[in-house]
Image (cartoon, rainbow, N blue to C red):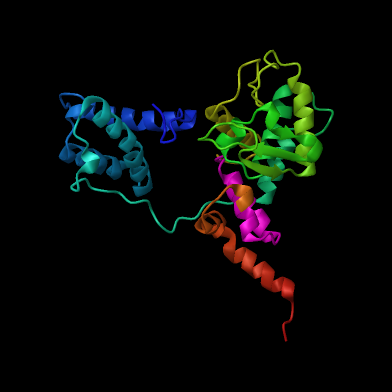
């Protein structure tokens, strides 16, 4: 199944949609409902969402509801099945408001970099060199899927840049946005490329390769890597996406204009700046005022 651009969905998107369908199927089995998905009416789907809400939060219910929409649209197109999402009686679970993203503390990021060798040229272990480079690239504000979609040709290390290609569109020359890299990120990527030359699949166009000579890394591999390194550093679990929130806060704290932050992050809406940087807004405001000193 393709997205609205006529292109295949990203692996993470397919996994998310499939998990929502499996959750619905498990509930139908527990309820001993007869028939298949094409026979589900609005009242039955409302019962499912209500039961899911009772054991989860509103945000989780909203996510499952959104992810099932695509499935029921497909059933409608392929089997001419009734689509409950077209029924006004379907109970909607709105996304929670007021929740703020979690920005990572600087100590957390530096500790993750330390447990992956801190960029030392003496570290020869492929996995550590790769993980260190990936964490450094995450601090540049890339989405997890953007990082995983990188190819060798997207790197322009002699200029200190990499090119992020749109996830849902064609990979054509000149597309996407340009990301300026920190000097240490360039060094980390250079050392990773050297270590990558000894990988069994070094001829692959994918930038990030798995350990033990496995193929290119997937989202589940990235998630496990970040959390494994967090545990090594003595921390609890973390989402790769939190690095993106931290990136926004870092730039705004350094005085980078909001328009420039939007460009680097690939955001079209000003509201995204508010959302991604909201949890540290007060801290940034207090520091800005203190830097001014006495005003009178």
The answer to which of 53 and 269 lies nearer the viewer is: 269
Residue lying at 75% horizontally and 27% vertically, measured from the top left:
192
Q: Residue reaching furthest front?
A: 173
Residue lying at 69% horizontally and 48% vertically, measured from the top left:
107
When the figure is inspected, residue 62 is found, relative to residue 250, above or below; the finding is: above
Residue lying at 27% horizontally and 33% vertically, measured from the top left:
72
Indicate the position of residue 209 as horizontal and vertical percent values: 65, 22
Q: Quadrant of residue 116?
A: top right
Tell me if residue 76 can be seen: yes
The answer to which of 108 and 16 lies nearer the viewer is: 16
Residue lying at 64% horizontally and 69% vertically, measured from the top left:
286
When the figure is inspected, residue 193 is found, relative to residue 283, above or below; the finding is: above
Magenta-highlighted residues:
238-262
In the rendered image, the quadrant that contains the N terminus is top left
Indicate the position of residue 263 as horizontal and vertical percent values: 62, 51
Q: Residue reaching furthest right?
A: 122
The answer to which of 86 and 51 lies nearer the viewer is: 86
Q: Magenta stretch: residue 259 in it?
A: yes
């Amino acid at each position: 199944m393709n997205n609205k651009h006529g292109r295949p969905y990203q692996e993470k998107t397919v996994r998310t949609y499939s998990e929502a369908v499996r959750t619905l199927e498990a509930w139908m089995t527990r309820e001993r409902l007869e028939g298949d998905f094409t026979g589900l009416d609005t009242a039955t789907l409302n019962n499912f969402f209500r039961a899911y809400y009772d054991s989860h939060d509103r945000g989780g219910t909203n996510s499952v509801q959104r992810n099932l929409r695509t499935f029921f649209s497909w059933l409608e197109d392929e089997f001419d099945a009734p689509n409950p999402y077209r029924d006004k009686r379907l109970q909607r679970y709105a996304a929670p408001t007021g929740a703020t993203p979690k920005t990572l503390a600087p100590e957390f990021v530096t500790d993750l970099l330390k447990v992956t060798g801190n960029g030392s040229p003496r570290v020869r272990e492929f996995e550590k060199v790769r993980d260190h480079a990936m964490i450094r690239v995450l601090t540049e504000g890339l989405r997890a899927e953007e990082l995983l979609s990188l190819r060798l040709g997207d790197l322009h290390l002699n200029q200190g840049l990499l090119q992020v290609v749109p996830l849902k569109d064609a990979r054509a020359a000149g597309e996407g946005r340009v990301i300026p890299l920190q000097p240490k990120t360039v060094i980390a990527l250079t050392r990773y490329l050297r270590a990558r030359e000894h990988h069994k699949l070094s001829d692959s166009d994918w930038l990030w390769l798995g350990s033990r000579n496995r193929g290119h890394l997937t989202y589940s591999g990235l998630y496990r890597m970040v959390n494994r390194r967090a545990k090594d550093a003595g921390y609890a679990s973390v989402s790769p996406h939190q690095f993106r929130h931290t990136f926004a806060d870092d730039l705004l704290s350094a005085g980078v204009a909001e328009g420039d932050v939007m460009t680097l992050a690939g955001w079209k809406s000003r509201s995204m700046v508010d959302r991604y940087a909201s949890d540290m807004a007060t801290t940034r405001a207090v520091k800005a005022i203190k830097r001014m000193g006495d005003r009178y």
